[in-house]
Amino acid sequence: MLEIKNLSFGFGGRKVLEDVNFTIDEGESVLIAGKNGAGKTTLLRCLNGIFNNYEGQILLNNKKIEAKDRYSFGYLPSSLSFYDKMKIGESIDFHKSIYPYFSLITFPDYKLETNRRIEELSKGEKVLFYLILVLSHNPSYFFIDDILHLLDPYLRETFLNILIERMEEKKLSVIISSQTFSDIEGLPVKLIILDKGKIILKESVETLKRAFFKVTAKKIPEDLPVIYKKDWGDFEEGYLYPYERKKSEDLKMESVKLSEIIKSIIGGNYVKKRD
Amino acid sequence: MKIYNDFKIDFSSAVPIYDQIKKHIKYLVLSGDLKENEELPSVRKLASFLKINPNTVAKAYRELVFEGVVDSRPGKGFWIKKRKGGDGEKEKILKEEFEKFVEKAVELGFSSKELREFLIKFIGGKDA
Amino acid sequence: MLKKEIKDTIGELLIILLLIIGLSFLALIKGVEFYIIPLLELILLLYPVFSGWSIFSREKKENSFEYLFSLPIGKNSILINKLIPRIVSVLLVLVIYLPLREYFASDFFFDKNIFIILYLLLFILSFSFSLLFNNIAMVLASITFFGMFMILIDMKVWKLLWYSDIYILIIIVALSFPIVFIYSFIKDDILPIKLFNRKFLTRSIITFIIVLVGLTVFIKLSGMNNYNYYMLTKNGKIIISDVKSLKVVDAETGKTILSIDYKVFPIVYKDDLLYGETEEKDKSKLISINLKTKEIKNIHEAEKYSFFSNPHINDNGITFLVREGGDYKSILIINKDKIRKIDFPKGAISGGVFLFKLISESPLCFIYTKYNNKTYKYENGKTEHFFTGDIKFYKNRMVLCDKSSFKVYERGNSEPVFAKNEGGHIFLKWFERPYEKRFMVVKLTSGVYIFDFETLDLHKINLKFKKDNSVVTGSFVDKTIIAIWNNNTPYITVMVYKKGRLISKKGYKSSFKKDKYIYLSRKGMMVIKWMKKYEFIKF
């Protein structure tokens, strides 16, 4: 279990993360969302040893995290930082020399050309190669920082299947920070939304969906908890949260997809209400 | 396998995914599309097919076992459970479910006439 | 991790080793070595710069830090894994190159110790700057800037005289960069690099200033940059100059006989006259001070930063070499009130001169010995190698002593007046250059002898000493005094011989252990702790 307790981080006097608290269980998958600059990448960097000067604690199985704990971590940074001058074969050897349980996974319909240099790969190919490399050292926690959109839809599906397999078989926990995720809707069980470095929402997807509704009406009543509203002229469209559905209701209400929920939370006045 | 036919998760629904799976399987059992002793797809396979978290599939299967719809043998997989009793038992289960349904319909403000029309339309629609 | 770093290092190592081998072969070709050897030295000094800088420059260029730090390796291990192969290769190149440069022994080379210090200094500095600069030119520029700044500090603030002191202090100052770098690397987050560099730079500049100020205070308080020049005259007067003033002390009583507020660097003493060098605004001057009358006399003026060196006293007076702008320009001959200057023909003399003896003025003929023990003779407008070994003069006699023979010649006679078919070594210290002493101590294969230049007698004496012993000899009309000491103990053994016969042997204990040298007089010896302190021990 990975526990993040009162995590705060800043650089150059600017606060980037403030009092972040959450836990990730074995086999759990968490989606971290938020506007650009909300602190998603910084959070993942704190968890993966790039930033160490944070306040608060990161605990793995109740112990303060150390460098060696990262044997069970896999990290796909959005920067795709790597030894670009290396050949694919060399980089596999290098990665292998560091992770003792490395066993190269095969990706259906994709053959690694060991003589090509990393810098010669396209961005999508680099993401794929990185994924293969990281999954090959058999991590228990897999952090993906908003990079999957660079994969083509076919590879994205293949990758998703590998993830599902790992989650089922090896209790892999997946932590994804993402902006676009229509094809991974069904993966996360927990949603964390960051805004200006603070967690503004931390909820199981199941609970969230039960209390989230889209309402369409000529005029949405003032007493409803509208967090995001669009005026179409002759009618209004609004998102309600948290809302418990009444026994009798005249309003047209419908449930919405996770992506729409996130959009309305980070874009609406849910944020403002909390300030 | 019949289970995959027309099996789509509605991600915009407030009904939790595991519940959607449960409902789908129960419906197939009821309609006879899933027969007794018929093997269900593995958790991984169904999760990959539906592009969802395998834990969600596992949760649905677990609850189906608990409710007596599905049988599990550790390490081997999941089967549709053999019905105890005959059609009487079937009727009893359906009756229980139906009571819940009627209760919900009343909650939502359906009149008995509306409910009857709805049912006829629903069954008719399915038959068609 | 280590494997990759070793691989990265070996590539660079092979290139430098090939360069060393290639250039060394080229240097064996006559005429080319003049260009090749300095080039080799320069390339060798670039290697530690490159190796130190490469420690993180690749990560920075390839943007691979995020990957590197996400690996399950602590920062300490990353640093160690990166440093070890580079330190090993840098030391390896040094170990290979040192004997090579000894073999070439070029005038262009730095002194061996200075080279080693410079080589290591370049490594630690460029290592500290490996995250700061994107290209090696910036590293070189900053190191050059640092070096020039330190030279300026030494010239204007520290005013130290000894290279060894200056280099040690510069190393201490320079160490503040790698220490701060390692501290920052372990403590701070490396990304974003700009922020890391800002913190590192602020910290190192503060540390640098603190260390610089601390060292300066230390130098001033400890008197590290106060120098004294000591001299003991045959009649027991101690001459002390701290450059700003001059003092003459009676060795036996310790009383100050004379004190003059005059900026002078003493060179040689003869008949109550102390010859010294003084610097004025735009010139250097050779002066004489009469220790009885305090009268100061100008003897010769030369352009600024000239040296008057290699004094040689004989019956005809004193000769000095005049060095202007690094080259020996002329000979100065002082005989009572008569001063004569003879300019050297071009190319007649070069390099550092250990001893100099003028043989005749017209036609000009002289002999000089360089620090490598090679003696050259200038005669008939030509300089030729004359002898390799120890050489010493007395009046019109000259002794040549090498590994295989000991021969004494007299002017105008090509056959030796005395010869012994075994070689050895004459004891001759830099501060007792041939002042026409009658007795000398020589160690030959068969033993140690006292040689009398007057009678040409070679007296064997029963004297044993170890390799690291220092020996100084004094000759006084009829007797020879020999002092032997070791620089690691405070003990000094003093023996007095008369016609080769030991008449007294006594042990003395000095308050100084290291860096001591001794002047002998008839009544006692002055033990000097290198430019700092002295004591007079009575026999």
Image (tube, rainbow, N blue to C red):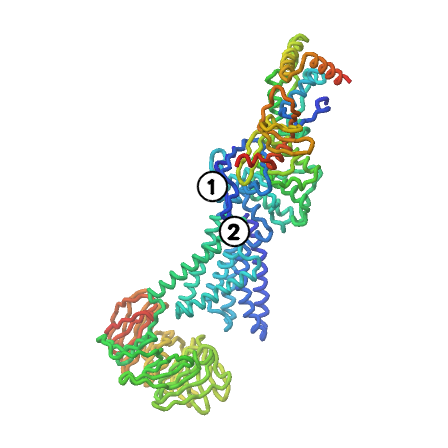
Tell me where residue C74 appears, x and y as whole percent.
50, 45
Q: Is residue B46 above or below residue C393?
A: above
Location of the C terminus of chain C (image quadrant): bottom left
Q: Is residue A19 above or below residue C119?
A: above
Q: Secondary structure at mark 1?
A: strand
Inspect this view and state whether residue C146 appears: yes
Residue kind at label 2, given as amino acid type: Leu
Tell me where residue C7 appears, x and y as whole percent.
58, 52
Report whether C358 appears left or right of B122.
Answer: left
Q: Is residue B38 above or below residue C444?
A: above
Name the chain under label 1.
A
Q: Secondary structure at mark 2?
A: helix
- Residue B38, by quadrant, is top right
Tell me where residue C319 appears, x and y as whole percent.
39, 85
Q: Could you say which is closer to the camera, residue C23 or residue C474? A: C23
Residue named by callout 2:
C195
Residue named by callout 1:
A55
Q: Residue at x 34, y 89 (%)?
A: C336
Residue kind at label 1, given as amino acid type: Glu
Q: Mark 1 vs mark 2: tell me if same chain.
A: no
Name the chain under label 2.
C
- Is the residue under label 2 in contact with that under label 1 (CB below 8 Å)? no
Alpha carbons under labels 1 and 2: distance apart:
18 Å
Q: Residue at x 25, y 69 (%)?
A: C508
Q: Could you say which is closer to the camera, residue C454 or residue C355? A: C355
Neighbor class of circle 2 (other Cα within 10 Å; few <14, some 14-19, many 20+) is some
Tell me where residue C49 appears, x and y as whole percent.
53, 60
Q: Could you say which is closer to the camera, residue C411 or residue C33? A: C33
Neighbor class of circle 1 (other Cα within 10 Å; few <14, some 14-19, many 20+) is some
Query: Tag on residue A43?
Result: none
